[in-house]
Image: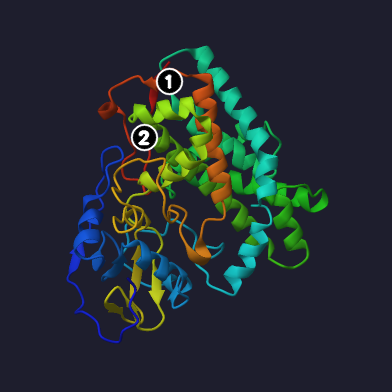
Amino acid sequence: MTSESPSAAPAPDVRFWPVDDLPSLQPDPFLDDVLREEPVTRIRLRHGDGHAWLVTRYEDVRFVTSDPRFSREKVVGCPVTTMAPTPVASQTAGLQYIDAPRHTHLRRVVARAFTARGMRRLRPMAERTAHSLLDTMEKAGPPADLMEHLHTPFPIAVVCYFLGAEEGDWVAWADNSRTMLSTAGDSERGRAARADTRGRVADLLRRRREDPREDLASVLAQAAATGEITDDEALSLAMAVYVSGGHAVANNSGSMLYALLTHPDRLDRLRRDPAVVTAAVEELYRYVPHRNGVGIPRIATEDVAVGGHVIPKGDAVYNAYVAANRDPGVYPDPDLLDFDRRGPGHLAFGHGPHFCLASLMARMEAEVMITTLLDRFPKLRLAVPAAEVDFQREGLIRGPSTLPVTW
């Protein structure tokens, strides 16, 4: 548990964490070890300078991610040990690298689109899109790659519509999305795809300033028109939602289906009782290791006691959400996929001020994909042995690269 005592244990030794590729949905053994042996520890990653603290227990992760003494803003320009040679998210705009009060203000603007009402408006379109994509897959016949036919295009279609594009327009955006998510950011193709997508988003924001509707572009365009945010912030926020909304959902939902297809008893239960799907989605978010390593760190702005250690002012701290989601002190039998599990909510969408705004949309998308698949293909199963399903390599987000199925 988090400790406010002035006394603290000696600083732990610095461990090198290579963050290697792992097969299928295997939890990271490094995280398993430190969660059990040294839940507040220090690490060094492949890139950057020095060391950082790593927090793995559920309560400690919740504490660090919600305490204002740990700053995202202070990370900018700070030489922190990292997994990647360059920051994945832009450090110059958006929500990722800012603190309150500016973060609170921008988040309130974006949150106007991420409402329960907004998700109810979005769901019929999501259901139509899922059926349309599966129509194509069914016509092609088995075996088929679910990543190609459903998990990759579906979230692109939904996030485009949520942003403000017309329902069928996502097809014109899809090639850029695939390029941005599969090509190194400094490649010529990757830069061209990002530039073209930024142009599409900027054009949409201009049109929604004159013709507002119930979508994210309208919310951002109107906020920019009234001076609540700048035009650059509106564009950056829209791009961040678009890119992350497609990439994360594609991989997470693919991993969820792999988990179900490799747990046939759980899959049979969902077929028999579709009312369990909502609970199943929550447990799948807890169970699936959705990322490799860790995300964006925070910097301690003063000495802070955490889990029996004092993290000194100026030190970087990483939070391992995937480890916290398997904390045995919170989730008994954490490696068991249990749709009847009770207890506190998972941390797959983070916690605190930077909790993922798109969580409602991601949950809705997962429910739609699972229910539509089971309704359309009651005999759905893997077309190859589970060990032969290829998963992505050298990526920050984990998920199948292909998911061959038959029915």
Work out which quarter of the rendered image holds the C terminus and state it.
top left
Separation (CA) of disc 1 from disc 2: 13 Å
Q: Is residue 172 above or below residue 332?
A: above
Estimate how packed mark 1 is, as few (under 14), some (14 to 19) or many (20 or more) residues with alpha carbons within 10 Å. some
Q: How many discs mark residues in the rendered view? A: 2
Residue 178 horizontal/vertical position (percent)? 49, 37
Residue 273 horizontal/vertical position (percent)? 49, 29
Q: Quadrant of residue 297?
A: bottom left
Q: Which residue is mark 1?
A: 380
What residue lies at 46% left-to-right and 42% top-to-bottom?
Answer: 181
Residue 290 horizontal/vertical position (percent)? 38, 46
38 to the left or right of 130: left
Q: Quadrant of residue 168?
A: top right
SS at circle 1: loop
Using the image as rendered, state which of residue 103 and residue 256 is in the foreground.
256
Three-letter code, disc 2: Ala
Using the image as rendered, state which of residue 291 and residue 266 is in the foreground.
266
Using the image as rendered, state which of residue 134 and residue 208 is in the foreground.
134
Work out which quarter of the rendered image holds the N terminus and state it.
bottom left
Q: Is residue 240 above or below residue 231?
A: above
Three-letter code, disc 1: Leu
What residue lies at 55% left-to-right and 63% top-to-bottom?
Answer: 95
89 to the left or right of 206: left
**Marks 1 and 2 close (CB-CB < 8 Å):** no
Estimate how packed mark 2 is, as few (under 14), some (14 to 19) or many (20 or more) residues with alpha carbons within 10 Å. many
Q: Is residue 189 among what the camera can see?
A: no
What residue lies at 25% left-to-right and 60% top-to-bottom?
Answer: 35
Q: Is residue 214 above or below residue 86?
A: above
Q: Which residue is mark 2?
A: 259
